[in-house]
Image (spheres, helix red, strand yellow):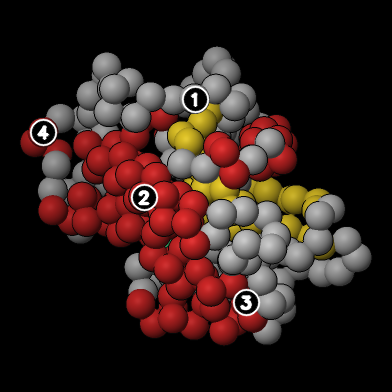
Amino acid sequence: MIMGIVMVIMVMAMVIMVMAMVIMVIIPIPGAAAVIDLDVTSDASLAALAPAVSAHTPQLDLVIYAAGLLHRRHAPPGEPAGPERRLADVSRDSLTAAMAVNGFGPILAAAALEKLVPRRDRHAVWATLTARVGSIGDNGLGGWYAYRASKAAANMLMRTLAIEWRRSRPAATVLAIHPGTVATPLSAPFRSPDHPGVLPAADAADNILARIADAEPSLSGSFLAYDGSPIEW
Ligand SMILES: NC(=O)c1ccc[n+]([C@@H]2O[C@H](COP(=O)([O-])OP(=O)(O)OC[C@H]3O[C@@H](n4cnc5c(N)ncnc54)[C@H](OP(=O)(O)O)[C@@H]3O)[C@@H](O)[C@H]2O)c1
């Protein structure tokens, strides 16, 4: 089963991030990282998350949701493992798998962790890594049905969360961030070695941290590219 995400946490302003895009280690200075297993498709795992995080910190100043699924490593026999190239490739299983991790995962994680996000006395950032291909307006190529739809769903859910937290957590900023094409296992089958514009994971992490550093509450609910430019919904 898929495990081993991301969750971390810090109460300090200074962080060092070591990132292979998804396993994020955010290290408070001074201090050590805590790595907590989470399967975002499991209600039991989500229910255990806040108690596990609370053992390390009373509140979260930053959460980066970086789980993602583009191709299935365990597709049922006879079904394509990769993202759909045509309608005939679409299946309930592929739609459900992508939606569970990419679409519903970020909002369920937010629901699980909400009580640890400061109400108004401290600035907090919730950043979900979505994808430009989740933009409906920008979709000129087609294909990748499940991934596109699940990222569009995540964008909508983050926008909706931003509106709720504007009232209940006015110092919080919720962002959907497109990290660019990054050299990770997710993108590996879809890029050639000389694919233009592929970012090393460390550079992508720097870009994401720059977006987070700029994350004023007035930007909450934005869908941004890694360079800070807005992406149409
Ligand atoms: N790489 C790119 O070019 C690119 C472009 C646009 C957007 N993005 C987005 O950026 C984010 C990071 O992508 P990446 O490139 O780092 O992908 P990656 O290398 O494939 O990593 C994906 C991560 O998601 C985790 N994950 C999958 N299902 C999970 C679940 N049910 N519960 C918890 N964790 C789960 C995986 O954990 P396991 O290894 O344990 O399965 C893995 O650590 C994703 O949201 C992706 O869609 C990436």
Say if mark 2 contacts mark 3, CB within 8 Å. Answer: no
Q: Is residue 13 left or right of residue 45?
A: right
Distance, label 4 to label 3, CA atoms, is 42 Å
- Which residue is labeled 3 in the image? 53
Q: Position of residue 148 (x, y in %)?
A: 29, 37
Distance, label 2 to label 1, CA atoms, is 17 Å
**Which numbered marker is on residue 87?**
4
Question: What residue is rendered at 55% in x and 22% in y?
Answer: 229
Q: Helix, strand or loop at disc 4?
A: helix
Q: Helix, strand or loop at disc 3?
A: helix
Q: Is residue 58 left or right of residue 91?
A: right
Position above or below: 161 against 52: above
Disc 4 versus disc 3: nearer the observer: 3
Mark found first going from the N terminus, 2 or 1: 2
Q: Is residue 127 visible?
A: no
Mark found first going from the N terminus, 2 or 3: 3
Looking at the picture, which amino acid does disc 3 mark? Val
Distance, label 3 to label 1, CA atoms, is 32 Å
Disc 4 versus disc 1: nearer the observer: 1
Q: Quadrant of residue 41?
A: bottom left
Q: Position of residue 207 (x, y in %)?
A: 67, 33
Say if mark 4 contacts mark 3, CB within 8 Å. Answer: no
Mark found first going from the N terminus, 4 or 1: 4
Q: Position of residue 75 (x, y in %)?
A: 25, 55
- Which residue is labeled 1 in the image? 230
Residue farthest toward the right in the current orientation of the protein? 30
Say if mark 2 contacts mark 1, CB within 8 Å. Answer: no
- Which residue is labeled 2 in the image? 160
Looking at the picture, which amino acid does disc 1 mark? Pro
